[in-house]
Amino acid sequence: MLKQQLRAISSLLTSITMIGICVGMTSTLLSLRATIENFGTLTTGVIMSAYFIGFLFGTTRAPKDIRRVGYIRAFGGLAALAAASILIQAIWIDPTVWFVMRFLTGFAISAIFVIVESWLNTMADNKNRGTLLSVYLVLIYGGLVAGQLILGVADPAGFMAFAIVALLINLALIPILISVTVEPTTHESKKVPIRSLFKLVPLGIVNAFIMQACYAMFYGIGPMYATYIGLSVAQVSLFMASFILGGMLAQAPIGLLSDRFDRRIIMAVCAGLGSVMALVLAQLGASVAWLIYLCVGLFGACVLPLYSLGMAHTNDYLEKDQMVGATGAIIKIGGVGSIIGAPAVAALMQFGAVDFFFLLIMALTAVVCLYSLYRVTRRAKADDQLTSSYAMLGPSQTSDELLTTLVDEHEYQVELAEREAEEEGDEDDEKEASDEIKERS
């Protein structure tokens, strides 16, 4: 049964693997090219944050358009948009243009993840959904690693690397456009306001904000930092690939541990070890490249699973009909962290504090460690944690249900704003009528 389903979704998995390769190549490529073009660290950080702005905007705005035009046509249009934005950055070397194009890339990629994950959730059943999603996420991480390795043999100063990314995005169109899979349907779910979620599970919110900020720092500015300490382009690629590979290998073992022990303890241990590895990395130079690869791999193994751990911990304290809505809220909080993360560390490096790159990440992960331990003293472990399964989370945590939630929430906010405007208009009319009566009298 599982083999048949894997065969049925092979086209989706092929497409998303190619997209993963492109995502893995793009951020490192742009960071290295920005260094070559002397954009400046702060400018580069702002450009990299545009991707996360677009990603956040895509997860909240794109679903409505996807539901209107259909998944297949939306995928084709979004892939074309992503490919065009990459090529424009190769043709037009300008920080403002790059910011706009990076925003469009983030928007397109986030919506593509919505489409693919919705398809996967529709085709899976309760018996094998976890296995299918695990295969999907392993392929995503594998694509990210492969993207770094491909970049190691392509010159970021030339046009070829950008052309490879655009070519792979276009090739990713072929499998999904010829797929005969029925488009996914959507379901109702319960909204969970961010304020209510923070009161209920504050660690989940704090962890999502901080860890996504750390990820944005590493993916956006990490290649530039590696260049500053003396690594070559090929070594920078191995530097980034080691980080992703470490996280990929550690996801499942850490997830199993978190299902058996208090998740907050596992989060504290991972964050604490991540802080230690960040401190070690802050002391290393290019003369010991092999040690850098080893340490950054261990660092990735510690910090990359933290976002998934936080999501699982949040779900431990929620009802089933709240989980999808809570995921939407956490995506927004994490998106804000991502937008702030890269420019923040870039500003430090702009003023000569290059050594503070890993020290800042160390401080942030230490906050997660200490706050996790603090929450252990304030609240008992969730009673149903042993039956609340941990799931590896990739670059996007969307699904068909979340798609519906985000669209419905947007429509609800628009309706609420219109209602408030009407009420204000009625109050103004009543006031004018009262003033007119007073004048007549």
Image (cartoon, grey):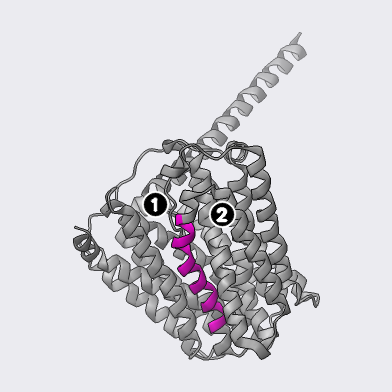
- Comparing 199 with 255, the one in front is 255
Amino acid type assigned to the residue bearing label 2 in the image: Ile
Query: Where in the figure is residue 364, as x and y percent of width and height?
Result: 69, 60
Q: Report the residue at 43% width, 79% height from top.
A: 146
Q: Quadrant of the N terminus?
A: bottom left
Question: CB of mark 1 within 8 Å of CB of mark 2?
Answer: no
Q: Is residue 99 left or right of residue 388?
A: right
Amino acid type assigned to the residue bearing label 1 in the image: Ser
Query: Where in the figure is residue 62, as x and y percent of width and height?
Result: 44, 55
Classify mark 2: residues with Cα within 10 Å, few (<14), some (14-19) or many (20+).
many
Q: Secondary structure at mark 2?
A: helix
User: Picture quarter containing residue 120?
Assistant: bottom left
Mark 1–mark 2 Cα distance, whole angstroms, equals: 27 Å
Q: Quadrant of the C terminus?
A: top right
- Comparing 423 with 188, the one in front is 188
Mark 1 and mark 2 lie on one chain; the one further toward the N terminus is: 2
Q: Report the residue at 56% width, 69% height from top.
A: 300
Q: Secondary structure at mark 1?
A: loop
Q: Is residue 203 left or right of residue 7?
A: right
Residue sitting farthest toward the top: 441
**387 lies above or below 89:** above
Residue 62 visible? The answer is: yes
- Comparing 213 with 441, the one in front is 213
Whether residue 8 is in magenta: the answer is no
Q: Which residue is denoted by mark 2 in the rendering?
A: 266
From which residue to which does the magenta span run? 238-256
Whether residue 242 is in magenta: the answer is yes
Q: Which residue is denoted by mark 1 in the rendering?
A: 399
Classify mark 1: residues with Cα within 10 Å, few (<14), some (14-19) or many (20+).
many
Query: Where in the figure is residue 114, as x and y percent of width and height?
Result: 40, 57
Mark 1, mark 2: which one is toward the viewer?
A: 2
